[in-house]
């Protein structure tokens, strides 16, 4: 968990620095171009930006239509973690093709004497800026206009897997007659009730003392969600969200 926190911060800082350095290098390129060349470069950048957006829309639309046709004819049977793409959902996914630091890094990796390197750099920056601004600012109005239903597959999987995990934890300590085990069973039943009553929310962290019994129960819960992922009953996103919950619980239990 400390590693996740450190690397998320490091990646954020590196992205900020990279965009700053790229902006500092673009200004000299733009200032040494005359007006005619600037206009030509702007036309090329606009055409490439349009091609990038349309190519993604076309690809995602064809993919969704093909998958729906295969499922309708019984050729393909998706697992429980794979929702069938809809036309409206495909439009939103295709509009989420914002480009970022990887596009710019690939352009700046070209040698200094590469033919038309300045044009490639300006086009790459135009694609990044255009997709972030145009698609980023219009994504919410597009979702509202399509009136998409709230179908959060990850939330459904997390709720189902959370229930299975805490039931496995209860089963692990069910045969223990000690008072500590009974207190832990009461706590986990309350957590299970909370998880079933509020599938979209998390679970509260216990303040009870750490003990090996709690760590044993958490181990059973961890094995349960691992089995669900291996059986493809839940996807990686749901698994990692629950894994983080169990990591925090285990740390609290002195694990």
Image: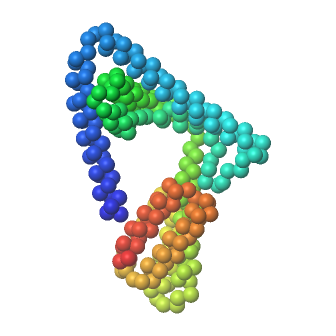
Q: Is residue 199 visible?
A: no
Judge by depth and name the residue closer to the eye, 253 or 57. 57
Q: Name which quarter of the figure residue 30 lies in.
A: top left
The answer to whether residue 84 is above or below residue 196 is above
Q: Is residue 230 left or right of residue 120?
A: right
In the rendered image, the residue lying farthest to the front is 113
Q: Is residue 119 left or right of residue 186?
A: left
Q: How many marks?
A: 0
Q: Name which quarter of the figure residue 20 lies in.
A: top left
Q: Is residue 250 left or right of residue 169?
A: left
The answer to whether residue 128 is above or below residue 177 is above
The answer to whether residue 135 is above or below residue 198 is above
Q: Please give the name of the residue rendered at 31% of the width and 12% of the height, measured from the top-left corner.
A: 37
Instruction: Identify the coloring.
Output: rainbow
Q: Quadrant of the C terminus?
A: bottom left
Judge by depth and name the residue closer to the eye, 163 or 17. 17
Q: Please give the name of the residue rendered at 22% of the width and 17% of the height, measured from the top-left corner.
A: 32
Counting from the top left corner in percent of width and height, residue 1 is at 35, 63
The answer to whether residue 203 is above or below residue 128 is below
Q: Please give the name of the residue rendered at 49% of the width and 78% of the height, measured from the top-left corner.
A: 217
In the rendered image, the residue lying farthest to the bottom is 177
Counting from the top left corner in percent of width and height, residue 210 is at 37, 80
Counting from the top left corner in percent of width and height, residue 73 is at 78, 42
Q: Please give the name of the residue rendered at 47% of the width and 60% of the height, measured from the top-left corner.
A: 240
Counting from the top left corner in percent of width and height, residue 192 is at 53, 69
Judge by depth and name the residue closer to the eye, 114 or 199. 114
Q: Is residue 94 visible?
A: yes
In the rendered image, the residue lying farthest to the top is 36
């Amino acid at each position: 968990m400390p590693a996740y926190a450190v690397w998320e911060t490091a990646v954020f800082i590196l992205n900020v620095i990279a965009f700053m350095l790229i902006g500092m290098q673009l200004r000299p390129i733009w200032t040494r171009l005359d007006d005619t060349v600037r206009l030509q470069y702007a036309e090329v950048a606009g055409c490439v930006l349009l091609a990038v957006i349309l190519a993604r829309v076309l690809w995602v639309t064809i993919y969704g239509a093909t998958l729906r046709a295969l499922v309708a004819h019984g050729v393909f049977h998706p697992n429980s973690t794979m929702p069938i793409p809809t036309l409206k959902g495909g439009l939103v996914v295709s509009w989420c093709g914002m480009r970022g630091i990887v596009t710019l890094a690939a352009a700046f990796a070209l040698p200094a004497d590469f033919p038309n390197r300045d044009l490639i750099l300006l086009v790459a920056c135009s694609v990044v800026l255009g997709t972030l601004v145009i698609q980023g600012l219009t994504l919410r109005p597009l979702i509202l206009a399509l009136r998409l239903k709230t179908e959060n597959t990850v939330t459904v999987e997390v709720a189902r897997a959370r229930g299975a995990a805490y039931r496995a934890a209860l089963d692990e300590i069910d045969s223990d007659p000690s008072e500590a085990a009974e207190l832990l069973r009461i706590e986990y039943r309350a957590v299970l009730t909370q998880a079933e009553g509020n599938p979209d929310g998390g679970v509260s962290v216990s303040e009870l003392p750490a003990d090996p019994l709690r760590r044993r129960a958490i181990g059973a819960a961890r094995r349960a969600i691992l089995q669900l992922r291996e059986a493809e009953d839940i996807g990686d996103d749901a698994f990692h969200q629950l894994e983080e919950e169990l990591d925090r619980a285990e740390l609290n239990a002195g694990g």
